[in-house]
Amino acid sequence: MPSDELVVLPAPNLDKAPARYDNEIDELDAHCQQLARDFLRENATIRDQSLTQLRDWIAKHPHIKRCRTDARFLLRFLRTKKYSFINASHMLERYLACRVVHPHWFKRLDIEDREMCGLVEAGFLYPLLEKDARGRTVIFGDAGTLDPKVYTVGHGSRMHMLVGETLYDDASVQCAGFVLVYDLSGITMGMLGLVTLNDIRDLATYLNNAVPMRIQELHFVNTPSLALKIANYTLALMNEKLRNRIMCHRSWEDLHKKVDKRLIPQEYGGKIPKEDHIAAFKQRCRIYRPQLLALDEMDYEVGRDMDSCKKSHVAEIETGTVGSFRKLQLD
């Protein structure tokens, strides 16, 4: 779409109980219709009933003060959790809580922000222009572009949120899911020094419990030995379902056996130059900018019950996987 035809999406209504709900949704193509029916247990009746139930829950929730209630937003959680109301509502609650507890990770997703724009233009993370044969959106990351003298873990997290929030409302993404590919060849000790065990633990908790995305495959290419210990620790904190979807590759040729090489940037063996993928993503960020900025206006009151839940989870990890990790370090 040429820049002079750019249509910016309006900011969503954040009234938790609006007089009129936004029920507009994207029409699914035949492939996604089958996925929704066969794997997500979706049909028009279940979808409408679930939206009504979730909206009623939001309206009555004492800690939710302001929140999107449009169908596209709520379907993120319902489709991710295959229309289990309990699981979808818990994920939405944790999503809202994470935005409050870690604002430096999840807020100010603004393409006009100098540092964020710099990471986008460097190619730290961006969706690729073409989907794979199974209709899945492919996201490509180059860890080596994050300069530890300029950026922090917070910047990296915000970039992941920026990519995610521009895609989560897409019906094809909600049904078919994501494939993520990371080039780790450029990781340095300086970059690893930015990451603490608490950062990894908190991010893993978010991925396990609060991320409204269906990760189908996660590929790491050229993982240097100095990153293996952190990688193993991170894997130990992931839930088994996600852990089983992670694959490591020694080379791009190995990756091409699992991911269609034509999809990835030309510089890595594909057909479309990296700059074209990045330019399209920058434009997408501009289209969604009002919606992205409106997310910061959502309001959730983190209560004692959420704090105690968090402490319980931390204690469980400390006596389990983190303890094992520390023994491994001593050995």
Image (cartoon, rainbow, N blue to C red):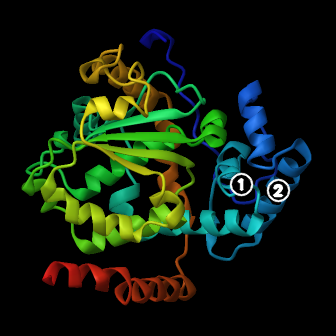
Whichever of callouts 1 and 2 sits on the residue coming sooner in the sequence is 2
- Amino acid beneath label 2: Ser
Instruction: Give residue 305's position: percent from left, percent from top.
Output: 57, 87
Instruction: Give residue 140's position: percent from left, percent from top.
Output: 36, 35
For label 2, the residue is 50
Instruction: Give residue 199's position: percent from left, percent from top.
Output: 29, 68
What's the residue at 78%, 35% (across, down)? Answer: 34
Dividing the picture into quadrants, the one containing residue 264 is top left
> Considering only vertical position in the picture, is 248 above or below 262?
below
For label 1, the residue is 78
> Considering only vertical position in the picture, is 249 above or below 97?
above
Along the line of sight, which residue is nearer the eye, 282 or 113? Answer: 282
User: From this viewpoint, which residue is outermost toward the right?
Assistant: 45
What's the residue at 64%, 49% (across, down)? Answer: 76
Left or right of 156? Residue 214 is right
Disc 2 on helix, strand or loop?
helix
Q: The C terminus lies in which quarter of the figure? A: bottom left
Instruction: Give residue 149's position: percent from left, percent from top.
Output: 8, 50
> Considering only vertical position in the picture, is 242 above or below 70?
below
Question: Which numbered disc covers residue 8?
Answer: none
Q: Crowding near pointer 2: few (<14 within 10 Å), some, many (20+)?
A: many
Labels 1 & 2 near each other (Cβ < 8 A): yes
Q: Crowding near pointer 1: few (<14 within 10 Å), some, many (20+)?
A: many
